[in-house]
């Protein structure tokens, strides 16, 4: 039942909570709690399949992982500013990547010295080797690999 209070010119109404509303909410929450029991089984099944996929993905990496790993390896192995990954391909069961780094910055930037390096990765993404393929000035026309 609403209470009416009169504070000068302002009249406010307050309502007490209805017990039936609380009972309805309790019943709804009880029914919602029973739903996770059904989904727990589905979650455990999907978790098992996710674990199987994770184990298989640990054995080999994809092209995007190979690209990312080549970029990380360039930062670790070479002390030059990373320019970009220009090639990623599979070779046998390994990955062959070609990256470019700025070996010497110059003004104007068309005179920068760019180094192209091949970084070899095994099937799991570990670096197995790297090699300088060539150096050139940024302004020179280069044939793509």
Image (tube, rainbow, N blue to C red):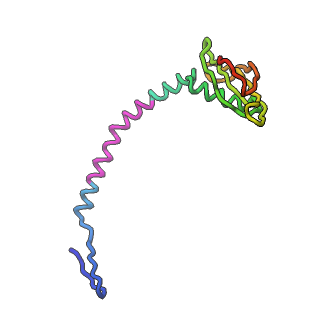
Name the magenta segment's main secondary structure.
helix
Provide residue 32's location: percent of width, then percent of height. 30, 47
68 vs 77, left or right, is left
Q: In this view, does 46 lie above or below 26?
A: above
Residue located farthest toward the bottom when viewing the structure as drawn = 8
Q: Find the magenta span and give its range.
A: 27-47
Quarter occupied by the C terminus: top right
| Residue that appears at 28% across and 48% down | 31
Q: Relative to 62, does residue 109 appear above or below in the rendering?
A: below
Q: Closest to the observer: 104 or 89?
A: 104
Residue at the image position 35 percent from the left and 42 percent from the top: 36
Residue, x 37% and y 34% (percent of image)?
A: 41
**Nearer to me, 54 or 139:** 139
Question: Is 34 contained in the magenta span?
Answer: yes
Query: Where's the N terminus, which quadrant?
Result: bottom left
Q: In this view, does 6 lie above or below 99?
A: below
Image x and y of residue 129, in percent: 72, 20
Magenta stretch: includes residue 138: no
Residue 130: x and y in percent read 73, 21
């Amino acid at each position: 039942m609403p209470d009416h209070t009169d504070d000068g010119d302002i009249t406010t109404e307050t309502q007490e909570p209805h017990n039936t509303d609380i009972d309805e909410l309790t019943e709804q929450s009880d029914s919602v709690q029973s739903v996770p029991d059904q989904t727990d089984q589905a979650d455990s099944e999907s978790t098992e399949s996710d674990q199987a996929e994770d184990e298989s993905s640990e054995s080999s990496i994809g092209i995007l992982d190979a690209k990312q790993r080549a970029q990380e390896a360039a930062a670790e192995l070479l002390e030059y500013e990373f320019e970009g990954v220009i090639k990623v391909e599979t070779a046998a069961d390994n990955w062959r990547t070609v990256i470019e780094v700025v070996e010497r910055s110059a003004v104007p930037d068309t005179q920068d010295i760019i180094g192209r390096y091949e970084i070899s990765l095994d099937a799991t993404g570990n670096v197995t080797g790297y090699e300088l393929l060539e150096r050139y000035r940024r302004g020179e026309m280069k044939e793509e690999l």
